């Protein structure tokens, strides 16, 4: 299936983009209202959505000079997986709204840039197909269903498909209220499937006459009773390391580490609890609470190389991109996501050099005011 106005790979449009904002403008221009509002929206007044960016902008850098930065190495590792730079792709539902190649395009782009893609439970492509495209650079994001057997099957399939971590999203027992999606009744176009969760006929039974259809799927499917003690059950289902996505406080960070989980600092891109703290502001207390016992990652508002520098300086091991990857995908499929990763990595390398650092291990909190 082809979509008429999508650019070929490597069009001048993509090559001409000099930053992620250019790719966002290009990506937005290629989406219909249903998809655009779904990707762009935050919860309620979208204060947290905006604050994720504003908080990065408020942090100031304290660069050092007269350091040999002729060779800058951006590489790092997440859970033992070598990355060319500390930039991965966050899970997002429904890549089929952006491009006909959907999650396969995103996975190929991540693999070709030696990054890592986190595949959403709500993907339009089966885990197995994405696993092949990701060539070992795959994490799987889990929404736990009330039907535990369904989730058990999904976890086993993810593991068999080469996923190297299970990212359990803990900030979404219910879907936050994205008002544009409520107003215009966000719905998945009929040609797109959600193969990890059932057939379109099964999903249709959860749909109602009002509001966002995704909110309806969530209300029916997602387990709202799961608590810390249940993590034992989750660990017993998988050999994969478990990462809890959606941690915003030192208290929960301590509990996560006590329960043998790594931590993904996130407010879901401002899509869940509006007025929740920005992720970069939540990061220091979390890093302080776990004292290096587990790995800590961050997403939310990362669009500049200096954002990556700040997150790493404050203790994150890597950052993940939500919307920027989707804008790249809409702008040009696999090539568009690759361009997103390439531009941000180039910015990050330059920012490191201009901060007087030649390796990610040299970043520390003294760099940020
Ligand atoms: C369109 C969209 C769909 C998303 N779907 C999921 C999802 O299925 N699972 C999940 O854990 N997070 C999901 N998220 C949240 C992202 O993983 C991530 O936390 C957030 O987008 C990061 O903020 P950013 O968009 O500013 O980079 C989604 C975000 C967006 C924008």
Image (cartoon, helix red, strand yellow):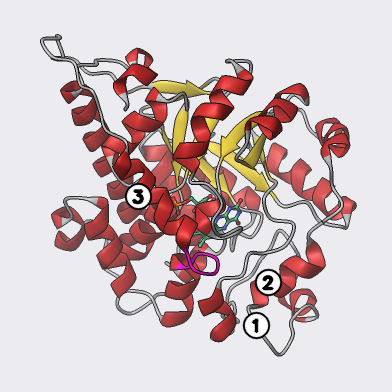
Going from N to C along the chain, the mark reached first, 3 or 1, is 3
Mark 1 nearby-residue class (10 Å; few <14, some 14–19, many ≥20): many
Q: Main secondary structure of the magenta part?
A: loop
Residue 54 tag number: 3
Closer to the camera in the image, 157 or 291: 291
Task: Name the residue that disc number 2 marks.
Answer: 215
Spatial CA span between label 3 and label 1: 30 Å
| Secondary structure category for the residue under label 2 | helix
In the image, which residues are magenta?
A: 41-46
Give me the residue at 71% from left, 37% from top.
Answer: 159
Judge: label 1 CB < 8 Å from ligand 1: no
| Secondary structure category for the residue under label 1 | loop
Task: Name the residue that disc number 1 marks.
Answer: 211
Locate residue 240: give its quadrant.
top right
Q: Is 45 inside the magenta-drawn segment?
A: yes
Relative height, residue 252 to residue 146 (above, below): above
Locate residue 124: give its quadrant.
bottom right
Q: Is residue 112 left or right of residue 66?
A: right
Is residue 242 in view?
A: no
Q: Position of residue 318 (x, y in %)?
A: 45, 30
């Amino acid at each position: 299936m082809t979509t008429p106005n999508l650019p070929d790979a490597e069009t001048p449009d993509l090559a001409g983009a000099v930053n992620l904002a250019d790719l966002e403008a290009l990506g937005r221009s290629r989406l219909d209202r249903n998809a655009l509002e779904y990707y762009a929206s935050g919860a309620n007044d979208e204060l947290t959505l905006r604050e994720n960016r504003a908080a990065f902008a408020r942090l100031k850098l304290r660069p050092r000079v007269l350091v040999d930065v002729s060779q800058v190495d951006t590489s790092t590792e997440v859970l033992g997986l070598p990355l060319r730079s500390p930039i991965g792709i966050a899970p997002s539902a429904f890549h089929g709204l952006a491009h006909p190649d959907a999650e396969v395009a995103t996975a190929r782009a991540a693999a070709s840039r030696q990054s890592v893609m986190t595949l959403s439970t709500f993907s339009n492509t089966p885990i197995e197909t994405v696993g092949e495209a990701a060539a070992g650079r795959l994490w799987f994001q889990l929404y736990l269903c009330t039907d535990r057997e369904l989730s058990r099957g999904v976890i086993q399939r993810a593991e068999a498909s080469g996923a190297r971590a299970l990212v359990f999203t803990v900030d979404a027992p219910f879907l936050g209220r994205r008002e544009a999606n409520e107003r215009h009744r966000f719905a998945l176009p009929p040609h797109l499937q959600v193969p990890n969760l059932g057939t379109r006929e099964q999903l249709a039974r959860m749909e109602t006459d009002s509001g966002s259809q995704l909110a309806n799927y969530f209300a029916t499917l997602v387990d709202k009773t799961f608590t810390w003690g249940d993590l034992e059950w989750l660990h017993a289902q998988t050999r994969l390391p478990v990462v809890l996505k959606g941690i915003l406080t030192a208290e929960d960070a301590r509990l996560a580490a006590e329960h043998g989980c790594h931590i993904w600092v996130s407010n879901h891109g401002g899509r869940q609890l509006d007025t929740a703290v920005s992720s970069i502001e939540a990061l220091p207390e979390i890093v302080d609470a776990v004292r290096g016992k587990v790995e800590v990652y961050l997403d939310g508002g990362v669009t500049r190389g200096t954002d990556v520098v700040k997150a790493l300086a404050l203790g994150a091991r890597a950052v993940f991109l939500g919307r920027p990857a989707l804008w790249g995908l809409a702008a040009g499929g696999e090539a568009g996501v690759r361009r997103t990763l390439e531009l941000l990595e180039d910015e990050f390398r330059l920012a490191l050099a201009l901060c007087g650092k030649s390796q990610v291990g040299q970043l520390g909190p003294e760099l940020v005011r």
